[in-house]
Image (cartoon, rainbow, N blue to C red):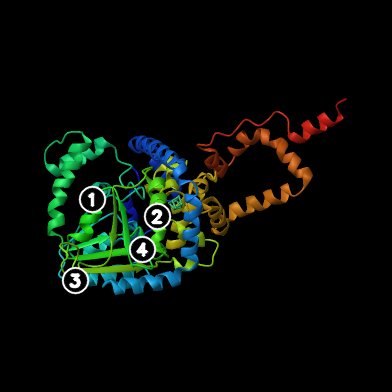
Amino acid sequence: MTVTYVEVARHRRAGEPLAPLRDRARASLGDEDLQGALRVMAGRFNVGRRIAMSDPAVSGLREKGMAIRSEGVARLRENLARLEKSLTDLGVHVHHAADGAAAVRVISDLARARGVKKVVKSKSMATEEIDLNAHLEDIGIEVVETDLGEYIVQKAHERPSHIIAPAVHKSRVQVTTLFSELAGHPLPDRREDLCAFAQERLRDDFLTADMGISGVNFACADTGTLVLVTNEGNGRMTTSLPPIHVAVMPIEKVLPRFSDLGVMVPLLVRNATGQKLSSYVSFLNGPRREGEVDGPEEMHVVILDNGRTGLLGTPFEPMLRCIRCAACLNVCPVYGTIGGHAYGGTYSGPMGAVLAPLLHGGEEFDDLPEATSLCGACSSVCPVGIPLHELLITLRQRARTSRGKRWFFGLWSRAWSRPSLYRASARLARYGRPLARLTPPGRRWAEGRTLPEPARQTFHAWWAKTRTAP
Ligand code: SF4
């Protein structure tokens, strides 16, 4: 059994601790369906991204994207103030939420005041971060996820395991079984039929919902335009059919200028799915105006901080450049082996291993920076140049370390500061494998690792021999 996000949410809300990362990872390793799904996912996304980003038409796009995001974050407060003014001028109600509880309160109060019974949602990791669905359901509101992947995980009582492909951990057979149970009769094991089934059910939900809730991919400070980048029409329906639209926007989504979209949208899409452009790019410019035939009567934006301003001016500030493309998840050998649920939080992969300890605090996610090989693949693909593996090292340095570990590394550091002890330990490395298994921590460390065969001769011994050779 994988540790599902449902359990994570339950633990978090009940204040119960999560199972240790080691146990969560072990559960994922034993899940054959998950392992198969992860292999397919990594191949599909990585090949697409490589082809899309090697296109000469986009040379220099990454550098431009990095510059735009760096500027956006460096002047975050100023950009947010400009955005608020632009949104207000468009007739949008702006709310500020210092944390998840405040965001939930704003949306719940609004829903109660308007007599909302049903909410349709398009994919939004920010609302996952604040457990919005569970809170709305607690006050008697029906919440329907309308992105196909989100719909699948909602119906399976799970939560997303990937930031752009929420149900990537599920095989088609599992989805067929799930949808057949919902339908009350067996459905064909074909993508088109499964999609048609979900579409048919969702159509009625779009038409009867009282409120639509979305995330935001980008928000332009100068025009107040909110941008949604999707591959299904559900984002557009969610934001235009119900009479009230609420967008939940983490503070870092703001861009200085509308013209930045010419760089940021293709950069996001090429790195996320390998497409040149996604099927739908929606530009939302306030509620319905007089004479317009569609759009919500009321529009609200909840600007969510939830620990983000605390990153400004710290070594972790670059994390606010993240555009949630998921390229770092797709190349990460650890994510590709344990999947998203094992990370235990809303965000997974290298970006999640950095963000979760920073945003959620506490000891619960302290061990996440250990979930990395530090190979640097994440940093090398990140389209906005976030030095993920360096941030992970910094987090490791700050993490609460056990006394045993501190003692071991202190001893190691002292030994390797003396040439004679360094040489002696290099000679001992030949016996590293059997030695590692002598103690329980050593056995745990060696478990699942293939230790390389040490050379028969140390470098120093070889050098000494070479130097004295005639
Ligand atoms: S950290 Fe970089 S690669 Fe990872 S999701 Fe964010 S922008 Fe994409």
- 254 left or right, relative to 202: right
Closer to the N terminus: mark 1 or mark 2?
1
Say what amino acid the circle numbered 3 marks: Arg
Residue sitting at x 20%, y 37%: 192
Residue sitting at x 26%, y 73%: 91
Total labels: the figure holds 4
Residue pointed to by mark 1:
233
Residue 164 pos. (x, y %)? 35, 49
Q: Are marks 3 and 2 in contact (CB under 8 Å)?
A: no
Q: Is residue 82 above or below residue 339?
A: below
Q: Is residue 56 above or below residue 103?
A: above
Of labels 3 and 2, the one closer to you: 2
Residue pointed to by mark 2:
262
Closer to the N terminus: mark 4 or mark 1?
4
Residue pointed to by mark 4:
219
Give SS at disc 1.
Answer: loop
Q: Is mark 1 within 8 Å of ligand 1?
A: no
Give the label on residue 38, or none. Answer: none
